[in-house]
Amino acid sequence: MSFQPQQNLSTFVRGIGVYDHSSPAAITYKGKLYVFYVGRGDDGIFYTSMNDWNWDPIKNINDQVKEIGVANNTSPSAVVFKDKLYLFYNGSGNDGTFYTTFDGRKWDPIVAVNAMVPGGMGFLPGTSPSVAMNQDAIQLFWNGRGDDGIFYASFNGTHWSRAGHIDNVGIARGTSPCAVLFNKKLHVFWNGRGGDSTYYCTFENGYWTPQRSVADQNRGQGYYPRTSPMTVVLDDKRLRLFWVGSGGPEQGLWYSDLVLNPYSWTRQQNMAKEIGGQGPLKKESSASGVKYEQSAYVFWEGDGQDIWFTYELAK
């Protein structure tokens, strides 16, 4: 089935306002779909949740946790680990990545990853963290503060590992990696420095595989500068990659599927055409997606600092 016509989340939830050049973060937790975003007033991270199309009023995490300050032009990233939701963000002082945890009712105090990772860590200003699960541990990825590539560290619930580096890759300046577990393998996607393709590699047998170009496999793919890729796992044999088209925000989102048996990428598709038109994305913002109750949902920041979304019933 095709994606459904776009809808403004403000139709269901009052008071949504997103900070410039930020992106929402969607995740499922305890039977609900959660959408997180940095507030328009640079006043913390807000969220709403939905179950059976009943959306809850927005809440500010700072109502429970007072210390949250998010770096300009960045977005949060969420993952579920040991029955808790972990929400990561880059700090407003550009001094490291932080996280808080949520049990469905209460948010816990902020934790500084920089203080927990042996040797420390730091991100390039204007970029965002990305988290995924692998080998029963959280895997955190970021664009290094020296503009020197993609770094990562893992957390097993007790200890953080020393930061590692994915060698021999070049990530576009002002963009962020996207990590996802698919086919029992940790995949990392990023937009390349040359501006010509999104690349990816996988972690196998303790090593990172050589990078591969999506454009080389799906007959062409290009992205808009200072935007980042995102993924949705549709099922155990299909991963969908989204990106902002090289023609700019007015062109909307594009996507291509990585499928197994045989291993291949489908030809790129313009989602905006499928949904009968997509309102312009906020410049230099990206999208977020998640599968919830057999449907793939995609969220993005609109030109009016609001959140729009569409969904596709699973095939």
Image: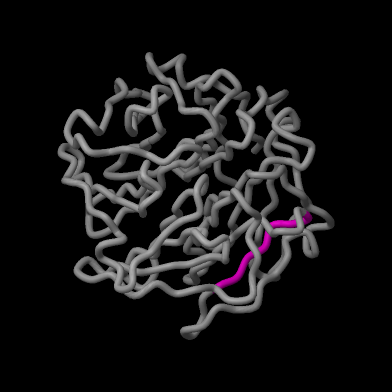
The residue lying at 60 percent from left, 22 percent from top is 303
**Highlighted range, magenta:** 196-202
Query: Which SS type dominates the magenta stretch?
Result: strand
Left or right position of 179 against 35: right
Q: Examine the structure image and report whether residue 197 is included in the region drawn in magenta.
A: yes
Asked if residue 67 lies left or right of residue 98, the reply is left
Q: Is residue 71 positioned above or below 133 on the image?
A: above
Locate residue 65, reporting x and y percent. 19, 37
Q: Is residue 121 above or below residue 173?
A: below
- Percent from the top left, x then y, of residue 107? 18, 41
Q: Residue at x 54, y 37 (%)?
A: 298
Residue 308 in the figure: left or right of residue 224: left
Q: Position of residue 310 (x, y in %)?
A: 56, 30
Q: Is residue 261 magenta?
A: no
Q: Quadrant of residue 149?
A: bottom right
- The structure residue drawn at horizontal position 64% and vertical position 75%, both measured from the top left corner, is 168
Choose between 53 and 178: the one closer to the eye: 178
